[in-house]
Image (cartoon, rainbow, N blue to C red):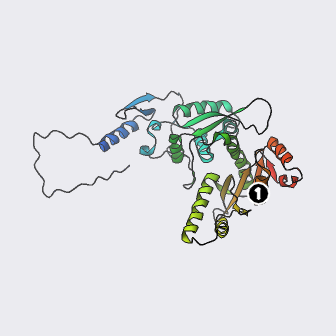
Amino acid sequence: MRFDIPHDVPRRRQPESPETPPLEPSPIERHRDRLNQQASHPHQVNLPRADGREQVHHEVADSRSRSIPHDQRPQRDRIPPQTIGMSLRSEELKLLADVGRFRVISTRDLAETVYDNRPSRLERDLAFLKQQGLVQVDAVQARRDGRRGRSEHIEVVTLTRAGKDVARQTSGLPEGQKLYAGLVKPREVEHDSQIYCAYWKEAERIESAGGRNLRVQLDFELKARIQKAIYAERKADPEQDMNEIKQQVARQFDLPLVNDGIQIPDARIEYDLDQGSQSGHADIEVLTAAYRPGHLRNKAQAGFRLYASSSDRATLTAKVEGEHHLLDNILEL
């Protein structure tokens, strides 16, 4: 990291006084010295003290070699302090990248996709990543939706802010890929975690058709961009009809307008075709038993790639009795 310190050039050099005491090192010099010291101990994790004045070195409590590959190692002064000198394996890097992209993923799905159905390895790596303050693991209550029986819990993983910073530096994801940290809306976690499953099923179809370099936009990002575009149009022409603005913005984002509302999918997968000369996208929506019939009709008319679990599909079938054609194109998670 480069620090540019403004200073005035003296007109004439003044002789130094022999009684002048030596200057204390500046905060920038102390920071530089700490980074140099940390670089000389690559197998240590540096944990800052609560008062922020000193750093105490603790050996990593893991006998494995855990150094980040040199070709993926970010600039040392941009890594969170507690992760300097820490090592990560390819599965751990993939875990951080996927959880960052989708905000929340269940441990069951991570064990299946990233760890090739080896949950014991996932548990070991999660313990290490939790110890380093990069991930958080929570048990959230599953949706009831009229289900009978005992309440179930789902174990899910999210990134901390430090984990998000590390994922940004080491994931190799495209620059425009947004990453998320923290658990938001626990009541919707089960639905949100299913988006990851739908993504992998859709990604297989896209890649088999020649799609490459997949990027993900969740509805959080799409909604923010759409609201910003609507605001800009209204500001540019306050007299313009709102329906006209919605139609224009819907065309801009290639999204359907159904019943005077812009339909936003749970996630949009963007990808390249023909070695990057063309691009495409697929919009996916995860349906749950909580969807009302009207909401389901809108999503069906929008033309999204619809996914639902077998149990949710059974409940939805009962809700739209007489309109079973709405379920014809729903794919199973």
Q: In which quarter of the image is residue 255?
A: bottom right
Q: Position of residue 153 (x, y in %)?
A: 70, 32
Q: Position of residue 146 (x, y in %)?
A: 79, 38
**Would residue 178 be found to the left or right of residue 25 on screen?**
right
- Where is 41 relative to 307, above or below? above
Give the quadrant of residue 160.
top right
Query: Which one is in front, 63 or 296?
Result: 296
Q: Name the residue under label 1.
A: 298
Q: Quadrant of the C terminus?
A: top right
**SS under mark 1:** helix
Q: Pick whichever, 126 or 71, lies toward us.
A: 126
Going 63% across and 62% down the picture, which residue do you hit?
Answer: 276
Q: Is residue 112 left or right of residue 224?
A: right
Q: What residue type is labelled 1?
A: Asn
Task: Check the image and report above or below for 323 versus 333.
Answer: below
Q: Quadrant of residue 194?
A: top right
